[in-house]
Image (cartoon, grey):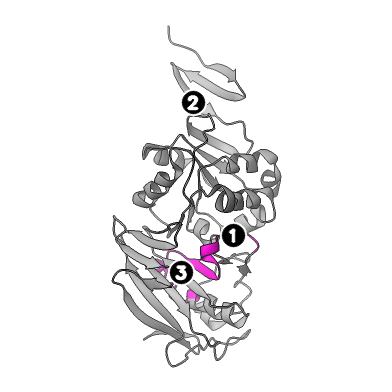
Amino acid sequence: MPLKFTLFLLLGINFVQISGAQTPTSTVLASIGITGDTTDVHVPTVNGYVLGGGSTDVKEALKWMIERAKGGDVVIIRASGTTGYNDFIYGLGGVNSVETLLINSRELALHPATATRIRQAELLFIAGGDQGNYVKFWQDTPVEDAINYLIHVKKAPVGGTSAGCAVLGGVSFAALNDGINSVEALTNPYDSKMTLLNGGFIDIPVLKNIITDTHYSNRSRYGRHLAFLARMKTDGIKKPRGIGVDEKTSVCIDEKGIARVFGSQAAYFLLADSRKPETCEEGKKLTWNRKKQAVSIVKIAATPEGAGKFDLNRWKPLTTGTAGYWFAENGVLFEN
């Protein structure tokens, strides 16, 4: 006789049994679903960071993270959306479980069980969405502390895509007053929408003074990225740098600071000139020329096997890349 819907309570974990199949459900308030074994495993991990450019996730980059998680538990955090990553990542193999936490309020970010679950992760991935909400909901809460615990103490791999990538840099575009496009940023680098956050959130040492950007060539974000660097330089940040990532592309950074570019498009590594912009003021169009060499760029093509490499410590390509310069004149971006 077919089994009816029966609810089991076992060791604090709920199971719904339908026709003999069991679907585990986490007791963490922020959890919206878990796939796999609910038993918390304890395994050594190898740290590393993934900067995802948005759109379709790069399986090879996720597998790179999974290898470093050593069969542990994966936690996805987001402020909107569903459990789409659960079955997808679990299906790649090599993990004990995948759980999604929907942390869409400061109340949930302050709930002790939320941070506890993040600390138990052997792999943390921040989904896409709105980075402004990530800052509003998670900054200066136990969630922030838990993420930094994974980075500094547990040495677990941490990554994110799109908005999840935006908050991983030492400097980030917080988007607290909505997004901004390249034309707007170059026209007024102190536009009210240019909300940059310098530290005080997620702390990845190898990404200090680096601002990321995503959906890069797909949304023509070169100009706004240059404007971000101009703001950083003008505001006194030393050696501003940037990493821009195209869609369907991920930059995987190992424990030695060596980046590999996986996927199908490209990643861009930007380094600001030592001199400040000629004109970077509120209400004025950006001019950052410096003999047409305001920002040096190295473009590394992505491949499925991550053959393209870049050394973040020395800021030099380790494989063949395309080098050049970007500069701005009276609010217009040029390439040299």
Q: Position of residue 280 (x, y in %)?
A: 58, 86
Q: Which residues are magenta?
A: 200-225
- Asked if disc 2 and disc 3 are in contact, CB closer than 8 Å, the reply is no
Front in this rendered view, residue 201 or 33: 201
- Left or right of 108 in this view: 332: left
Magenta-drawn stretch contains 22 = no
Asked whether, in this view, residue 157 is left or right of residue 309, the answer is right
Give the SS element for disc 3. loop
Question: Answer yes or no: do the residues labelled 1 and 2 have beta carbons within 8 Å?
Answer: no
Q: Secondary structure at mark 1?
A: loop
SS state under label 2 = strand
Q: Which residue is mark 3?
A: 313
Q: Is residue 311 visible?
A: yes
Query: Reading the chain from its start, which is encountered first: label 1 or label 2?
Result: 2
The residue located at (67%, 47%) in the rendering is 109
Q: How many neighbours does mark 1 have within 10 angstroms: few (below 14), some (14-19), or many (20 or more)? A: many
User: At 67% across and 44% down in the image, what residue appears?
Assistant: 108
Q: CA distance from mark 3 to mark 1?
A: 17 Å
* Disc number placed over residue 23 in the picture, else none: 2
Q: Quadrant of residue 205?
A: bottom right
Mark number, residue 188: none
At which x and y percent is residue 201?
63, 59
* Above or below 182: residue 202: above
- Which residue is at the far bottom? 291
**Pick the front one: 5 or 70:** 70
Crowding around mark 2 (Cα neighbors within 10 Å: few <14, some 14 to 19, many 20+) is some
Where residue 167 appears, x then y in whole percent? 55, 60
Query: What is the distance, in whole Å, between disc 2 and disc 3 at their CAs?
Result: 45 Å
Asked if 178 appears above or below 297 in the picture, the reply is above
